Amino acid sequence: MKDKRPVNLDISTIQLPLPAITSILHRISGVIIFVGIGILLWIFETSIETEAGFNALKTGLSSPFIKFLLWGIFSALAYHLIAGCKHLLMDIGLGESLAGGLLGAKLTIFISTLGIIVIGIWIW
């Protein structure tokens, strides 16, 4: 039997709902955290190895690029934590409806944005 459904291969015309976008961002933030943990461990190791390493790291951490990198890692961590809490609430039955999923996605974006702004203020 031949399938007669239309096939849309143009990604730019597909409109994803907000809960789908937050889910995709949750996965992307997990990948960023995975890579960022390696960077943070290297920074930690360098800071405790020698006094010269600590001083070099202290100087390097004042660089805008390094601050931006750390802001990105910590922002991904904040978003991932908040989206993970939303998923835990959904696991116990809260927000499983269509309206609840949309509200949860909006709250995730709002709370994450506030957290990311606070992290940026803290780093700079």
Image (cartoon, grey):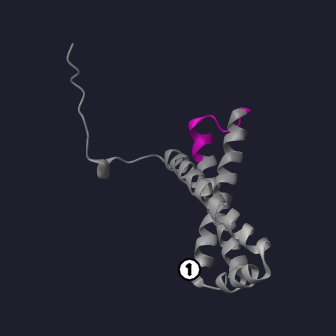
**In the image shown, does 96 or 58 lie closer to the viewer?**
58
Q: How many marks?
A: 1
Front-most of residues 68 and 3: 68
- Asked whether 13 or 120 is in front, the reply is 120
Q: Is residue 7 magenta?
A: no
User: What residue lies at 61% left-to-right and 53% top-to-bottom?
Assistant: 34
Residue 85, x across and y down, in percent: 71, 46
Q: Answer few, some or many: residues within 10 Å of disc 1's Cα (few below 14, many 20 plus, some between 14 and 19).
A: few
What residue is drawn where x is 59% and y is 42%? 101
- The quadrant holding residue 5 is top left
Residue nearer the viewer, 45 or 40: 45
Position above or below: 3 against 121: above
Return the residue at label 1.
65
Q: Circle 1 sits in a helix, a strand or a loop, which is it?
A: helix
Q: Quadrant of residue 45?
A: bottom right
Q: Is residue 101 magenta?
A: yes
Q: Residue at x 67, y 81 (%)?
A: 61
Where's residue 26, x and y in %? 58, 50
Q: Position of residue 106 (x, y in %)?
A: 60, 53
Q: Tell me: residue 68, above or below residue 109.
A: below
Name the image quarter holding the C terminus: bottom right
Please provide the residue range marked out in magenta: 92-102
Furthest toward the top, the residue is 1
Residue at 56%, 52% (x, y): give it: 31
Query: Amino acid under label 1?
Result: Phe
